[in-house]
Image: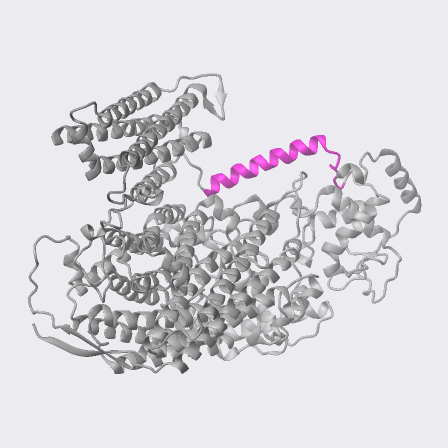
Amino acid sequence: MELQKFQYDNKIVKWFAYATMTWGIVGMLAGLLAALQLCIPAFNMNLPYTTFGRVRPIHTNAVIFAFVGNGIFMGVYYSLQRLLKARMFSDLLSKVHFFGWQLIIVLAAVSLALGKTTGKEYAELEWPIDILITIVWVVFGWNMFGTIIRRRERHLYVAVWFYIATLVTIAMLHIVNSIEIPVSFWKSYSWYAGVQDALVQWWYGHNAVAFFLTTPYLGLMYYFLPKAANRPVYSYRLSIIHFWSLIFIYIWAGPHHLLYTAIPDWAQSLGVVFSVMLIAPSWGGMINGLLTLRGAWDKVREEVVLKFMVVAVTAYGMATFEGPMLSLKNVSAIAHYTDWIVAHVHVGALGWNGFLTFGILYWIIPKMFRTELYSKKLANAHFWIGTLGIVLYVVPLYFSGIMQSLMWKEFTPEGQLKWQFMDTVTKMIPFYLARAIGGTLYLIGAVMMVYNLVKTTRKGSFLANEDAEAPALEKKYTSHGKEHWHRWIERKPIQLMIVSLVVVAIGGAIEFVPTFLVKSNIPTIASVKPYTPLELHGRDIYVREGCYTCHSQMIRPFRSETARYGEYSKAGEFVYDHPFQWGSKRTGPDLARIGGKYPDSWHYNHMMDPTSMSPGSIMPSYPWLLDDQVDVSSTVAKIKAMKRLGVPYPDGYERIAAAEMEKQAKGIAENLKKDGIKTLADREIVALIAYLQRMGTDIKNQPKTAENKN
Amino acid sequence: MLNQVNKNRKLLLLLLVLPLSNYAQDAVVTVHTSYFSNALFNTLLVIIAVLLAVIVTLGQTLKKLADSDYFRNRYQKKEEGSSTGDALKKTSLVLLLLFGYHSYAGNGQPAAADDWLIGGLDMFTFYSLLGIIVAEFAVISILYNIITGLLKTERKQKPAPVQKVKTKTILEKINASVDIEKEQDIMLDHDYDGIRELDNDLPPWWKYGFYLTVAISVIYMINFHVVKTGDLQTEEYEKSMAAAKAEVEAYMKTAAGNVDESTVKQLEGADIEQGKEIFTGNCAACHGKDGQGTVGPNLTDAYWLHGGSMPDIFKSIKYGWVDKGMKSWKEDLSPMQIAQLTSYIRTLAGTNPAGAKAAQGDLYKEESILINDSTKTVSDTLIIKSDSLK
């Protein structure tokens, strides 16, 4: 057999590595800013671009898609070439992929800061960027499969299975969740509404965690951990079982983000049981990682790369055990909407994704630069300061989350809620401060790493094209004796991709189809009507400012919630909500029934300076809403888009919409005037007030109780 | 002899499965009597299942050990003399038999109606389940002893380190890992960029844990969506509301804080202080911190939109004037708190704070005699003092 010579492309790996480090620091800084804003509202800086509602999506998008995303590509481009014994299919595609992805990140950061958002968590980017993501993802897939086709290794290693599953599933998730009707170049409405939107969104949100933060990183673990430890992988059989069960089961678990909400009970129950069944498949990865280190634990003590990896895998194990526990309905009843969830995801993010990325960076940079790490001592210090940072970040939030939830639920013997919402917020501030300190430590560690690695690159000489050789694959495969049945699919990449796609498509399909087609899943309510044009504008402002990052719009059927917020939310109330805005965190109170609770002037003053109306509030001020005019030019397009989505506005309504809008706005301005507030009717604040006053009131248009008639 | 071992193994497996079939029967019975809605029953059932998983795991470990070269050698050697291994196996068999038998006894008969209830379970069921748990513990401890015993004798039997024998760590035992020294035997011929793969078996605890979660999931779905013994969220909510209502009613019957608009009287002293605190926390946002009025009307002048008497103000707070922006506070404040708040608001009359809002509504004139009267009645008849509230 002829031995072929070829070269691995290290340059593209280096670029992605630099991007990973850069965006890591940027994303963490955004996170730190958001953390500080929660304890010191002055950090919102009274600017639209820097309020929490916009910084938080910038932070999440930056750390997930920029930091971890580039981390994935760095690791995949390094390991894929070596596992397949082939250079990447096309250097040009690699470059297009790299620059395309960085362009997406920059566009994302700018558009999010400008308030261009779809209002769907972790999928906030507007439709032009969505299309760009799809294109770049296809380029990545093309490059990956091109390399696979040209491989010199017959069978695909487990890491590559994970890469393929990632590729197809992310494509599916992204496309299905991003179906939206454009209103203008930077504005669109989700194709789905209310309950359906929620179900699709959390199917996406949950599986973005699964297939962007988990499966590709498991793939990376399967390459870099045995390489760094120089040990064989513990169990091939375990790899097979946990790979297939993981990708199959993960998809179903999305509804566990929506327990006790208005989604159908059966979907919730599926979310619960599939989360419980997910423990073992998730732990399969951890076990295979940790047991691979059998006989190498003395090395772990010495080698900082392995230290990072061990903590990463352990954090993965903790987070994937905690996840199913949080998915039990009685635990979710306590934890949902609180800091507990924030703590949970950061065990995964800081521990699993962060530390594995650091470990890989510490390993490949010296390798590609043909030198030793600049300072092992500094790397060790990074390890300890990072670990301490995680603990300091996470522990206060567990405390605050549970404490706040219990306060929300506490009643006096007379049957009154014991705590005002504000009481429960002010008590959290010290914990938020502690969390910010933990985050700062983690960030300092990351900066130390960047310094250390930059110094390493200075010290070494970069090997852009690494020589390698391997025999070419023979045309026909002849098996040598008995082999494991799974070997068949390992030499059939296309089949592997198709089977993966089928396996991951099942769960979503079974959960969506009935919710979309069976009417009884979303009982309609006759008194629920479409939003008026002014309210629609107000709603878009609500979405733009990222109010959903702190306020839920979903009252769960608990005594403590109906006493505080009013009647629990019904599925039929959200049928015109494109997109749904149920939120996932209650830093502030639920707003599902805020309508009519306070006078218009209260809202006006509150948006201008929240502390004037609720002393102690940590909500940012929104002074620009008082000055900026509503963009009336888009009214017709908005109504038309809504009609296309099936919202039953009367025929020709878009023609009278402007007049209707003016009338309603004048009414609100009049109302404000009575309370001594002078404002023009065309200001954004008026539209927002219109929306806030509408929220949750439709089902109240029923006969009042005897008491209220007094 | 190998046949013998195999036969034994089959018997073992059968015995392990038998109790399982029992549970299946058990489940059918209990569905009708809706035992699944009993938390204690469920808890005990889960404990039983978990312990069963432990037993199966230990059984597997024992099986592995029995299959190991070392044990086989020893078994052959012992063939001539008395066979401890055999004896041990026999003991375990008997025990497992007993265990299976026990669970039959426990579940074979339908639960007898009994007046004695423990945590909502009749005594018979409770003790049967408890019995199963105890029996399971017994089996576990015996299995554990057999395993550790085997490993101990192994250590004792090899006195001189002719060849170094590595004892398995607990981790290796529960994972059923192949020794590192012997890992070449299970090294697969894959080599991916220098990464080799071992063919270790699935860790038994992991595998059976997986089965267990699947079983739990099936039971969960059956409970909530097939036989519908579990409460879904709407029923759960209604039940909790009814329970809370009963609880509050019971409290209010004995408690003193039960005032409404027809019985409310002006309070004094510490109650006014309490009222002020409530005002600052809840009302100042709209009515100003001194009641001068901002978004809401001025509370310090003599003009009232909805009446300025004690019962009028009490009612305005309790039910609100929602269309005018005043919310109903009855879910947030107890009747006594509203009384304290009303009393405080009435002390604001004529304080003339800075920045007072223009008067709204009608002039309300207090009959001074009435005030005197009411203060008197307060001191005479009011049973509740602020300290009795705490």
**Numbered circles on residues, count:** 0
Q: Position of residue A585 (x, y in %)?
A: 52, 58
**Position of A615 compared to B269: left or right?**
left
Q: Nearer the viewer, residue A564 or A549?
A: A549
Majority SS type along the magenta span: helix
Position of the C terminus of chain B, as image quadrant, is: top right
B119 up-or-down from A432: above or below: above
Q: Nearer the viewer, residue B312 or B93?
A: B93
**Residue B114 magenta-highlighted:** no
- Would you identify the image quadrant in which residue A216 lies? bottom left
Range covered by the magenta-colored residues: B233-261
Q: Residue at x 36, y 79 (%)?
A: A15
A636 up-or-down from A613: above or below: below
**Position of A139 compared to A267: left or right?**
left
A456 up-or-down from B172: above or below: below
**Residue B247 magenta-highlighted:** yes
Q: Position of residue A297 (x, y in %)?
A: 36, 55
Q: Is residue A118 visible?
A: no
Q: Is residue B141 visible?
A: yes
Q: Position of residue A266 (x, y in %)?
A: 37, 46
Q: Nearer the viewer, residue B170 or B15?
A: B170
Position of the N terminus of chain B, as image quadrant, is: top left
Q: Residue at x 20, y 37 (%)?
A: B67
Q: Residue at x 45, y 19 (%)?
A: B123
**Position of B194 compared to B373: left or right?**
left
A644 up-or-down from B366: above or below: below
**Position of B14 compared to A57: left or right?**
left
